[in-house]
Image (cartoon, grey):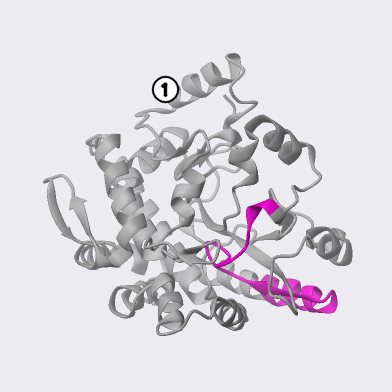
Amino acid sequence: MDHRFGGTEYTVGIEEELMLLDSETLDLTQGIEAILDELGEPFEGRVKPELMQSVLEIASAPHPTVAEAGEELRELRRTVGAAAERRGMLLAASGTHPSALWEQQLIVERPRYEELATELGYIAHRELIFGTHVHVGVSGADKAIYIADGIRKHLPLLLALSANSPLWRGHVTGMMSSRTPVFRAFPRVGIPPHYGSWEIYSSRVQLMMDAGAIPDYTYLWFDVRPHPNLGTVEVRVFDQQTRLDTTICLAALVVALVHRYAALFDEEMALVSVPTELIDDNKVRAALRGTDGELVDFPAPHQRHATELASRLLDELREHAEQLGCEEEIDGVRDLIEKGTGAHRQLEVLRGSDDVKGLVRALCEASAV
């Protein structure tokens, strides 16, 4: 399989999936085409549709630093927010809309999405969720597989730190990431296999294509994956963040992780394959309790508090963040550990009240930049 690994290392690109809301009712509105028509060709590739017409995706170009990628996202949020306002809409960011119903949403009129909705039916129509994706440039195909294999065991902790969807269909679910079980219904998602080499990865992708299961590798929606066409490793496990600064600190965490595993690859350090079922069990724990719960530590199978694991990981990545120039951005993770995640903030807004519409209004205000 062809690939473009081999370009500049540690470039950073970030994608955010945002909600389009009716400015009066604060319900989701089918507004993506109006935004795309208004912004036009200059924003092609940076402002994009997703599966549903009430979802808007913004995507930065690859940047040498996390700070630069974050600054482009800031400008994109401002631009699409202004365009939405001119069309009687508001933007908000969260892993789920607290009260929206998937039955009221329309699929985007694009062949990829229409075919997906036809093939998966209920599973696709129910996927009213919003995520953040981080791409990091990698210089070799085998290195990309090594890095993705290494990041697998950290995915539950990354989810816990990003948890930002405690409500679904107007109800507090008891989960910190209600987005996770919704997406779990899709095929080829969640914790990926440990591939071990580019040869194994590419042969297994080809097997799925030959079997007619997928048209190409982009239909593998795992929580971390190599992206051969872009020459990146992409981390996709995150709930969408309300505050842009939180998106930026999570991106810094990802690029520091990539740098760490790239260094281990260069040192020819052997990776231990952590069983998928253990990582997946951790992911359920993370979706349920976020940073309030315990996760199984690796390689010793002991349970430790998620905040303890996050603090330890921050310490381990400090040197890598300094080398990448993102030590200031990664410090934002400390706030998630000490002050709570987006899910905590949403539940705090609701404390002592059932004002879900007030929560949506608060999300709109906190999403502004």
The percent coordinates of residue 175 (x first, y second) are: 38, 60
Q: Quadrant of residue 311?
A: bottom left
- Can residue 165 be seen in the rendering of this structure? no
The residue sitting at the top extreme is 210
Above or below residue 278? Residue 291 is: below
Determine whether, in the image, residue 76 is placed left or right of residue 163: right
The percent coordinates of residue 318 (x first, y second) are: 28, 67
Q: Residue at left 40%, top 82%?
A: 351
Q: Quadrant of residue 92?
A: bottom right
Q: How many marks?
A: 1
Determine whether, in the image, residue 235 is placed left or right of residue 14: left
Q: Amino acid at mark 1?
A: Ile
For label 1, the crowd category at 10 Å Cα-Cα, with few meaning under 14, some 14 to 19 and many 20 or more, is some
Q: Which residue is identified by label 1?
A: 200
Above or below residue 263? Residue 91 is: below
Determine whether, in the image, residue 324 is placed left or right of residue 120: left
Q: Quadrant of residue 273?
A: top left
- Please check the rendered image and state whether residue 150 is part of the magenta-colored stretch, yes or no: no
Above or below residue 150? Residue 75 is: below
The percent coordinates of residue 259 (x first, y second) are: 37, 54
Report the front residue among 57 and 27.
27
- Can residue 214 be seen in the rendering of this structure? yes
Quarter of the rendering occupied by the C terminus: bottom right
Q: Residue at left 32%, top 42%?
A: 280
Report the front residue among 233 and 17.
17
The percent coordinates of residue 50 (x first, y second) are: 69, 51
- Please check the rendered image and state whether residue 86 is part of the magenta-colored stretch, yes or no: yes
Query: Tag 1's secondary structure?
Result: helix
Quarter of the rendering occupied by the N terminus: top right
Give the extent of the magenta segment.
76-103
